[in-house]
Amino acid sequence: MSYSIILYTVLMLSALGVVSAIILYFVAQKFKVFEDPRIDEVEAVLPGANCGGCGFPGCRGFADAFVKADDISTMFCPPGGNETFAAAAKVLGKEAIAQDPMIAVVRCSGSPEHRSRTSTYDGAQSCKIATTLFSGDTGCQFGCLGLGDCVVVCKFDAIYIDETTGLPVISDEKCTACGACVKACPKFIIEMRKKDPKGKRIFVSCINKEKGGVAKKSCAVACIGCGKCVKVCPHDAITMENNLAYIDYLKCKLCRKCVEDCPTNAILELHFPPRKPKVEVEVQPEKTE
C-alpha cells in the first residue's frame, strides 16, 4: 500500500512539473522581449569605460539608446572620440558628424601665494562635504577647496592635486572629456572647453563674482570685472556678468590680446610659444639746423 502511495505521489509531482514547464514556456514566449542584436555590436566598439560621459548609464545604456535613436547627431561618446563614434554609426549604416575634441579646465588659480589661508579645515576630506560646512579656508568663497573629489571620480587617472598649489591639474594626454570631474565639483570650478589641435586655450581662471576690490583682496589673481578684456577683444568673444568675465571658446580666435590687458593675470594662456620681448626703440633727438 505504501509503495502505491509513493508511486502515485511521484507521478503527480512529475505531471505537475511538466504542466508548470509548459505554462512557463508559453508565458515566456508571450512576454519575450526582443533585443536588437545591433546593440551588442555597438557596445563592442565602445571603450567600455562606463564613465557616463555620454549622458547614459554606462556603455550598454548608450548602445541601447544609440540603436533606438532616429537622430544620432546629439549623441556622442567623449572617451571614444570621433573614431569610435564613426564605428558605432557604421553599425547602423549612418554617417557620424565629427565633433570638436573637448578638455576639462580648472577655472581657479588661487594657489597659496595668491590666496592666503584664513583658517584650517580638519573635517572629512571631501569637497562636497566641506562645501556644506563652510565657504572655504581662504578669503575667497568661490575658490577650489583642493580636497580632490574630481580626482576620485576620474576613471582615466587624468587629474591630480598639485602639492605646491593645492589645485587640480588635468593631463592633456589622459583627459577624455567624460565630464565626471565637472559633475563632481561642488564649486562648479571645472568646465569643458574646446581642445585646440595644439592644446592651445585661453580662459578666465576665476569664478569669483565679488566686486573688484573685494575679489582682489581675496585673491591676487582674481577677475575684478574691470572690463578691459571685453573692450580689447576684436572678436566679441568676451562677456561680463556679475563682475566676472567669461570667454566664449566658440568665438575666441586665440589672439591673446585679452591676456596682455588683464591687470590681475586672471586670464590664462596655455601651450602658446613664449612671447617675444618687446623691443624698445630708442628715439633719436631731432637735428636742428
Image (cartoon, grey):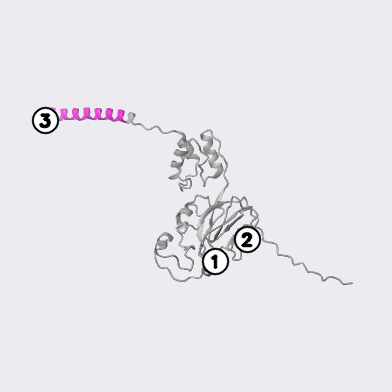
- The kind of secondary structure element at disc 2 is helix
Q: Which amino acid, by three-letter code, is at mark 1? A: Gly
- In reply to whether residue 13 is colored magenta, the answer given is yes
- The residue wearing badge 2 is 259
Q: Residue at x 46, y 71 (%)?
A: 118
The answer to whether residue 273 is above or below residue 177 is: below
Q: Residues under labels 1 and 2: Cα distance?
A: 18 Å
At 62% from the left edge and 61% from the top edge, which residue is drawn?
A: 259
Q: In which quarter of the image is residue 277?
A: bottom right
Query: Marks 3 and 1: which is nearer the front?
Result: 1
Quadrant of the rendering where the N terminus is positioned: top left
In the image, farthest residue toward the left? 1
- Residue 212's disc is 1
Label 3 to label 2: alpha-carbon separation: 99 Å
Image side of residue 238 versus residue 58, left or right:
right
Res 2 label: 3
Residue interval drawn in magenta: 1-27
- Residue 68 in percent (x, y) is at 46, 35
Q: Can residue 154 be seen in this view?
A: no
Q: Residue at x 77, y 67 (%)?
A: 281
Q: Would residue 86 be counted in the magenta stretch? A: no
The numbered mark, 3 or 2, whose residue comes first in the sequence reads 3
Look at label 2 and name its amino acid: Val
Q: Which quadrant: the C terminus?
A: bottom right
Q: How crowded is mark 1: few (under 14 residues within 10 Å), some or many (20 or more)?
A: some
Q: What element carries label 1?
A: helix
Q: Is the magenta stretch mostly helix, strand or loop?
A: helix
Name the residue type under label 3.
Ser
- The answer for how far apart the CA atoms under marks 3 and 1 are is 98 Å
Q: Which of marks 3 and 1 is nearer the N terminus?
A: 3
Point 52% across, 54% down: residue: 191
